[in-house]
Image: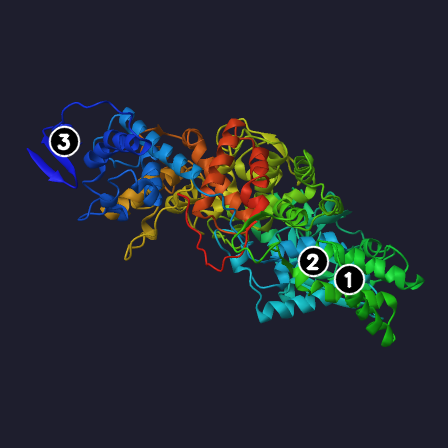
Amino acid sequence: MRIKVHGFIAVLFAGGVLLATESSLHPKPAATAQKPSTVQQAALTFEKAVQPLLAETCAPCHNDQMASGGLNLGGFSTPSSISQHRDGWERILQKIRTGEMPPEGLPRPPAARIEALMKFVQGEFEKADRNVKPDPGRVTARRLNRNEYSNTIRDLLGVDFRAERDFPTEDSGHGFDNMSDVLTISPVLMEKYLAAAERIAARAIGADPLPKKPVEAEYHFKHKTIRRLHASTIEAAHRVDWDGEYILRIGLPGERAPDGKPVKLGFWMDGKLLHTTLVETKPSKLEYFDPYSDAELRLVLPAGDHVFRAGFIDDEFVKGLAEKDVYNNKKNKFLNSITFVGPFPAKVEKPSRKKILICDPNSGAACVDKILSTLARRAYRRPVTKAEVASLAKFVGMAKAEGQTLEQGIQLAIQAMLVSPRFLFRVERDPDPTHAGRVHKISQIELASRLSYFLWSSMPDDELLRLAEAGKLRAPGMLEAQVKRMLADERSSALADNFAGQWLEVRNLDSVTPDPKKFPEWGPELRDAMKTETRMFFESLLRENRPLSDFLDAKYTFLNEQLAKHYGIEGVAGPDFRRVDLTTDQRGGILGHASILTVSSYPTRTSPVIRGKYLLQNFLGAPPPAPPPDVPNLDEEAVGTAGSLRQQLEKHRSNPACASCHNRMDVLGFGLENYDATGKWRTMDGKFPVDVSGTFPNGKSFSTPAEMKGLLKDELPDFARCIIEKMVTYSLGRGLERYDRKTVDEIGRKLAASGYRFQTLIDGIVFSLPFQSRRGETGKTEKAVSLR
């Protein structure tokens, strides 16, 4: 039986459907053989390798009447559809490659037929990409985000300023907060800039006098102005109004047994340990002695809003106390207050003054101009004109006219510098605006800023800027050498904080609040330890140029005693982090990090759905679609009592409309169920054994988290492409467009050839067309699209 449809003859037979052209069924008389054209050859291959498989396997569910998953293959019947509907074809390839299609329960075509289809379509992609005119895209003027602002202030003036505590929260685009299109300036932010510039300039120069009398501020538990984190640690948020030296008194009520040993007291600011000292804990021999004492410290503190913490370090005594005795004055010595007294003049000159006052401003106008021109060149990240220096010098003259010192005048000029658009924005200019849309290389000075804000989230240093000004940054071997130097610099930790912190969502640890009744060990110290582990792990992979596969199965991590105890790992003592080789397969790779496992959980329990979605989105570059409306919530009360979480979710997702996504998503999440909602290893879910076993859509099965990670390693090309796309997005400050596919593919090929070494990814981005060049203004509005 034959039916003519769309120029094809559908031959129905018992085994299925065979598509063929009319000419193949009714051949014409033989003629002189001619070699088919490229277009004809593509059509023949499409008819042979692609069309039959689509018709037999895909079309029954993806057609005009039933477009399952929102995909209708009606327009995918010709070779030209591969370029016309590239997004759809990319999606088809991904579903076939991962084994999601055809779905479970339907017959799977032979591997050779699948390989032939994928090879042909991928070849057509590459052919189309070769014919695409190179387009680097363009980035609008980019405002410094909060992290970039803080880091730039640090490197420009030597002042520690925490913009995240003063400025409004940044908007985010494409997963990152450095996207040019969302970095706008509101009236509120402008007011914050003005206030911050005044404070920062005053701190940098220190020309304003300190108050005549020291100020005292007490934070006490009885006034509820301090937080008890646990028996041996207290914490308070305090604004230090002036840089200077301060007396700090830590209130220590109570006493311990006569044989009590001294204990080490630590004092932290913003998570950084500033000072330690030993304090006595045993009773005094005085008859009427009140069991209360103060530990007094004298430290130089920077101005700004800070979180201060005081606590006993390695305090074994308190671990053996009954809960009712922890705050009993007769049985324990504990902490209950922090008092700040000051400021007093610091006995050493501020490093920021040495950085700014490179000569004595009282020696004359030439020195003032030298100070201002040096500062402005670094603040604006380019050479400055005489007119720009003169405009800044006017502020020095204004201050002098009002009876202020030259140092106060320079302080005022710094204020003006810090609210200038030249400082707040990174602007790249088209050399010839009359030629709309022309592609051109960015200047070497612009390249220096792109590079420094990519790797350091900060301004170019003197070496980088000097090379750019001299036109030597693009000299043979120079850019490679600078990238290597910058990655070795401690400022490259910004990639871990800002790129990895957002890619891996570790920043969200600051806002998660695990249920204290279910997870009593949770607290700021454990949270900070989790963040530190992931940051140090990322930095080690980057600086040691490790393969990207280490993200999935590294046999080492970075721990201190507290986090090691949380993981059940012995032999790690003390608060300092160190590299630890793993002797079991419970923690291999980043998916064993408590940071990742906590941010992908609910406050009260784990979530295989959230964890599965997390992996699809952040590791495999295949985020699932939004869930359908009116999906009922899970019965939380039944979890761990009426059935395990797995049993509840399997019942919950029995809706066929949900199964296609959840079959892929949930199997990944269930593979991590041995970790509770704070990343602690477990074998029971309530009173039910944890079952982590699963089977990927491609038929490969696992029974432990380590085995699942091994299967994910088989998908390393997808994982690598996901990281490439995210890091290219981060480096450019814009979403990726269709014309960026070629760049992503080229970086992917180089990365694979290097064994997926991390620094090959960095080099690939830095030397890529979109990083080195830009397209001139065209007046058209662009919209970023998925490359999947």
Q: Are marks 2 and 1 in contact (CB under 8 Å)?
A: yes
> Does the rendering let one see residue 245?
no
- Quickly name the residue at label 3: 16
Badge 3 density bin: few <14, some 14–19, many ≥20, Cα 10 Å: few
**Residue 36's image quarter?**
top left
**Which quarter of the rendering shows the C terminus?**
top left
Q: Secondary structure at mark 1?
A: helix
Badge 1 density bin: few <14, some 14–19, many ≥20, Cα 10 Å: many
**Which quarter of the rendering shows the N terminus?**
top left
Q: What residue is rendered at 66% in x and 41% in y?
A: 575
Q: Nearest to the eye among marks 1 and 3: give it.
A: 3
Residue 404 in the image: above or below residue 745: below
Q: Which mark is residue 203?
A: 1
Q: CA distance from mark 1 to mark 3?
A: 79 Å
The location of residue 33, given as percent across then percent down, is 24, 22
Q: Which mark is residue 370?
A: none
Foreground: 614 or 646? 614
Left or right: 505 in relation to 207: left
- Say whether disc 1 or disc 3 marks the residue closer to the N-terminus: 3
- The amino acid pointed to by label 1 is Arg
- Quickly name the residue at label 2: 161
